[in-house]
Image (spheres, rainbow, N blue to C red):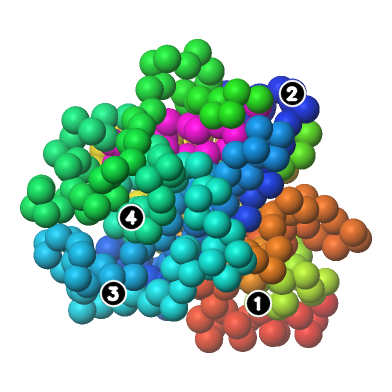
């Protein structure tokens, strides 16, 4: 277990990275496939696919963390995996993939030294075959010896990965045994060896799942959390980050609005309200992961507990691979990068503006009317 009272973030050695977020398409997934219990009105999850460009100017290196999904998935994925995404209730939309976005920004693909996969699933692995052979592919522990990840289709019939990802390039499997570092109780690797970017072992969703902790300034970090959770309601609120009495900005207003909304409105839709423990709606997450979504639910829980600790720190902005609540909060590449996420300029910063925005997902007519009524009386 991690120490809940204080998150020890790694010391600063003078180096940071520039991180940009790329919008690599959208999945729409029935909520019941991933989350429990059901909350009325939240029947589907908008799951954007985020990819990240990470640049370390001091060492002159660039990497991509996750690639979203490949555009030709209908032709190239294993039939059994394709079926998962062609499930009648799930939809996939990829107007531009990561390579299109990098091309539009005139970033030569040969400048990308590495691609890091958060895990082996096809909505993260993209199409590395579009990158030159000099771009290495970094994967989590046990990847190469696990028939669920390697080799890829068609050499191996039921895997998410496609063999063309590996051909002609270095495939590097992370070895956490070789690193003495731990962050928030999880094993970590100092990737550029300058304290700017840590790859963190975060197993459970899959046996190769990793996260990344990117230092954007001396003491501020982004946690690129992959699929450690599929909705921020799995780790908010908590005793470390309770639901406020007054939520400002209101999740139903513009992202930097000064209008507030009372937190008590959400008590009626919180699963706690149906139990004897209704008072804990301010400190209990709205959702739990469905056990079937994670390959090892017990280990996934350890990862989720660490995520709660990271999330409670004002110095860390947690970004899930599919978090729709940040879509209108963050500046997307190539229009901007995430460097200034912690800046305030008299307004809420990206974390403050985004933390409770997911409550919009629960904005049924009843809730919206309650919000309106309360705002009138304020
Ligand atoms: Zn995913």
User: Between marks 2 and 3, how big is the CA–CA gap?
Assistant: 45 Å
Q: Are the residues tagged 4 and 2 within 8 Å (C-beta)?
A: no
Task: Determine the CA span between mark 4 and mark 1.
Answer: 42 Å
| Whether residue 138 is visible | yes
Q: Which residue is mark 4?
A: 129
* Residue on which the image places disc 2: 13
Does the closest atom of ligand 1 sit within 8 Å of the Cβ of label 4?
no
Q: Is residue 304 magenta?
A: no
**Closer to the camera, 134 or 307?**
134
User: SS at mark 2?
Assistant: loop
Q: Quadrant of residue 34?
A: bottom left
Q: State if disc 3 and disc 2 touch (CB < 8 Å).
A: no
Q: Earlier in the sequence, mark 4 or mark 3?
A: 3
Decide which of tag 4 and tag 2 comes sooner along the chain. 2
The location of residue 303, given as percent across then percent down, is 43, 36
- Farthest residue toward the right? 346
Res 352 → quadrant: bottom right
In-front residue for pair 90/370 = 90
| Disc 4 versus disc 2: nearer the observer | 4
Percent x, y for residue 296?
Answer: 26, 38
Give the magenta range.
Answer: 195-213
Mark 4: few/some/many CA within 10 Å (<14, 14-19, 20+) = some
Marks 4 and 3 sit apart, C-alpha to C-alpha, by: 26 Å
Residue matched to label 1: 252
Labelled disc at residue 90: 3
């Amino acid at each position: 277990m991690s120490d809940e009272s204080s998150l020890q973030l790694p010391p600063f050695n003078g180096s940071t990275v520039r991180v940009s977020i790329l919008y690599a398409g959208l999945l729409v997934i029935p909520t019941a496939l991933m989350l429990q219990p059901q909350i009325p009105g939240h029947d589907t999850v908008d799951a954007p696919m985020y990819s990240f460009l990470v640049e370390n100017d001091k060492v002159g290196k660039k990497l991509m963390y996750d690639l979203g999904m490949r555009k030709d998935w209908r032709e190239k994925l294993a039939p059994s995996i394709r079926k998962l995404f062609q499930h009648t209730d799930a939809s996939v939309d990829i107007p531009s993939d990561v390579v299109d976005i990098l091309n539009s920004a005139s970033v030569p693909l040969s400048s990308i030294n590495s691609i890091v996969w958060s895990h082996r699933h096809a909505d993260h692995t993209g199409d590395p075959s579009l990158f030159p052979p000099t771009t290495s592919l970094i994967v989590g522990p046990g990847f190469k010896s696990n028939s669920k990840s390697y080799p890829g289709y068609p050499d191996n019939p039921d895997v998410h990965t496609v063999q063309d990802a590996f051909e002609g390039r270095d495939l590097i499997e992370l070895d956490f045994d070789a690193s003495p570092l731990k962050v928030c109780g999880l094993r970590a690797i100092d990737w550029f060896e300058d304290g700017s970017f840590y790859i963190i072992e975060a197993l459970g969703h899959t046996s190769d799942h990793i996260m990344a902790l990117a230092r954007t300034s001396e003491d501020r970090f982004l946690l690129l959390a992959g699929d450690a959770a599929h909705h921020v309601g799995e780790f908010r609120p908590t005793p470390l980050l309770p639901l406020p009495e007054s939520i400002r900005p209101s999740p139903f207003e513009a992202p930097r609005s000064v209008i507030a909304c009372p937190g008590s409105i959400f008590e009626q839709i919180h699963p706690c309200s149906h139990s004897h423990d209704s008072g804990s709606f301010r400190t209990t997450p709205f959702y739990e992961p469905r056990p079937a979504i994670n390959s090892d639910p017990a280990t996934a829980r350890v990862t989720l507990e660490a995520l709660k600790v990271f999330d409670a720190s004002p110095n860390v902005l947690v970004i899930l691979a599919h978090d729709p609540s940040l879509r209108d909060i963050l500046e997307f590449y190539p229009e901007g990068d995430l460097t200034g996420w912690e800046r305030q300029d008299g307004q809420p910063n990206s974390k403050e503006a985004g933390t409770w925005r997911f409550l919009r997902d629960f904005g049924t007519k009843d809730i919206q009317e309650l919000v309106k009524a309360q705002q009138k009386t304020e």
